[in-house]
Amino acid sequence: MGEVNGGMEQMIGASSLRDVLGECLCEAGRSEPNLVVLDADLSRSTKTAAFAAEFPERFIDVGIAEQNLIGVAAGLALGGKIPVAATFSVFYSRCLDQVRQSIAYTGLNVKLVGTHSGVSNGKDGATHHALFDLACFRALPGIAIINPGDPLELRQLFPQILNYRGPCYLRVTREALPPQAGPEAVLGKGRVLKEGSDAVICATGMMVSRSIQAAGDLDILGISTGVISFHTLRPFDEDLLITHLRSRRAVVTAEDHNSAGGLGCLVSELVGRTKPVPVVRVSSGDALGDTGTADEIYQALGLTSEAIVDAVLRALKIR
């Protein structure tokens, strides 16, 4: 693995995905005159401020008014623009009606970006943690859902998201994540980061790097475990997972999201109608978050490499 990137992962260190997002927006703005960026009074945090400084005529801050954010973005799309609307992931729960009626129902070419996903907003507390956004967007038909696991994935996927004709939800974490060696990220395709013959870990978002760590620890225990980064939850790469299920004894899913409606549910649904094998899910369970640093909350919720190791061991004992 890593042949396609040719060591690019070594050139890009651990980076906050919101910082990478700001860079991607500016790079895209220089070649795409129809790109318009919208924000809801969080541009310094979402990093859309860099785009605003370089392209002030193509930046709109609607204020703390997420419903208006969606309505203005829909109008711009009808006018032939490519609107990218950004706010914290948790605040999309305020405007789901507008997303349904104006974006999902119409299929408009709007790119919705949710930053500070999961509990990565740490000390802002549970009111600012997004542990159910994937479930909300999975329940809305027709919206592509992308949850990159490292800065390389985000850099490679962002141009594809802009070229995708239709609505997308891009989920971005706050904290720095290390780049992972592997094939180039392609929208709608899973990314096999490590092969393994006993079990496979399906990971998304910030849990990808922790899954790689867990697979390495399992290797030491003599358990060969593969890791697939599913950066795209819709359209989901069913063929890749089915291929890996044919000779593996168990599946573990890992996500910084509630147990309901995210990657774990998606994989369980697929396994149930294809090749039944044990599925153990690592998630935040049924929590709304807590107050503390992001690392403290990840530990409290069991979103760790140690929890993934334990899940693989439990899954292999089920059969």
Image (spheres, grey):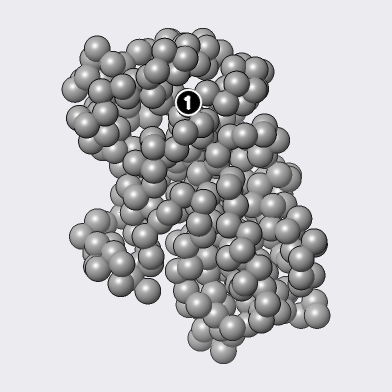
Outermost residue, bottom side? 222
Q: Is residue 20 above or below residue 222?
A: above
Q: Is residue 18 above or below residue 183?
A: above
- Could you tell me residue 232's position as x and y percent? 53, 49
Quadrant (top left, top right, bottom left, bottom right) of the N terminus: bottom left
Q: Is residue 39 above or below residue 266?
A: above
> Which residue is label 1 attached to?
110
> In the image shown, does 268 or 122 lie closer to the viewer?
268
Secondary element under disc 1, as helix, strand or loop, is loop
- Could you tell me residue 56's position as x and y percent? 23, 15
Q: Amino acid at mark 1?
A: Val
Report if residue 102 is visible in the image: yes
Q: Is residue 221 left or right of residue 269?
A: left
Residue 289: image quadrant is top right
Residue at the (34%, 50%) spot, across then down: 156
Q: Is residue 134 left or right of residue 25?
A: right
Q: Is residue 133 left or right of residue 17?
A: right
- Could you tell me residue 44's position as x and y percent? 32, 25
